[in-house]
Image (cartoon, helix red, strand yellow):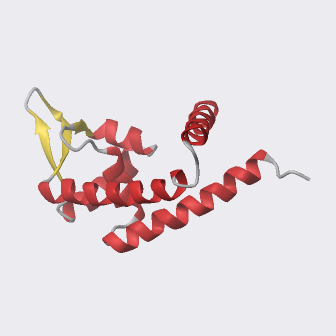
Amino acid sequence: MSRRLFELILAIKRKCQCNEEQIQEELGLTASQFHGLIVLDAGGEVAGCEFARRMGLSPSRGSRVLNSLVTSGLVATRNRPDDRRTMEISLTSTGRRMKNRIIERMKACESRVCDRLDDSGVRRVREALELLETVL
């Protein structure tokens, strides 16, 4: 009997989560710090409300994650000159280095998957995952 689609998704999620937790532990990041760094672009600023939206959090929960990142020296904030109610968030140099370390480890994890597939297999997996993300 073949497994249900949802069971497959959960199995993949567990395996990815183990890799994610390993990266977090290696880099000394909490899960929320890790996810916060993932959603920030290395060279730009993002508004506080956009940061929370990208993380899929309420503004108040996004604010707590942001405070943790600021306290850790990974991001800096400033009020926008044209609208002092809007906070802009950007990675610090330490934050950019940490994000680069995260990306290096994510690429290594991705390589472990891709090395077992030919180009056609990689393309099919990517297309299936993009489709799945779209419909979920």
Q: In terms of depth relative to the viewer, which is nearer, 113 or 40?
A: 113
Where is the C terminus found, in terms of image quarters?
top right
Q: In terms of depth relative to the viewer, which is nearer, 60 or 80?
A: 80
Picture coordinates of residue 74 (x, y %)? 20, 58
Identified at 18% across, 40% down, the residue is: 43
Q: Above or below — where is 71 with respect to 125?
A: below
Identified at 20% across, 53% down, the residue is: 96
Residue 56 falls left or right of residue 93: right
Identified at 47% across, 68% down, the residue is: 21
Q: Residue furthest right?
A: 1
Residue 96 falls left or right of residue 19: left
Q: Residue furthest front?
A: 118
Q: Above or below — where is 113 with respect to 118?
A: below
Identified at 46% across, 55% down, the residue is: 111
Q: Residue furthest left?
A: 81
Q: In terms of depth relative to the viewer, which is nearer, 86 or 38?
A: 38
Picture coordinates of residue 118 (x, y %)? 57, 45
The mark tally for this picture is 0
Give the quarter of the image for residue 34.
bottom left
State whether residue 64 appears in this view.
Answer: no
State whether residue 123 appears in this view.
Answer: yes
Picture coordinates of residue 57 (x, y %)? 44, 46
Q: Above or below — where is 130 with respect to 58?
A: above
Q: In terms of depth relative to the viewer, which is nearer, 109 or 49?
A: 109
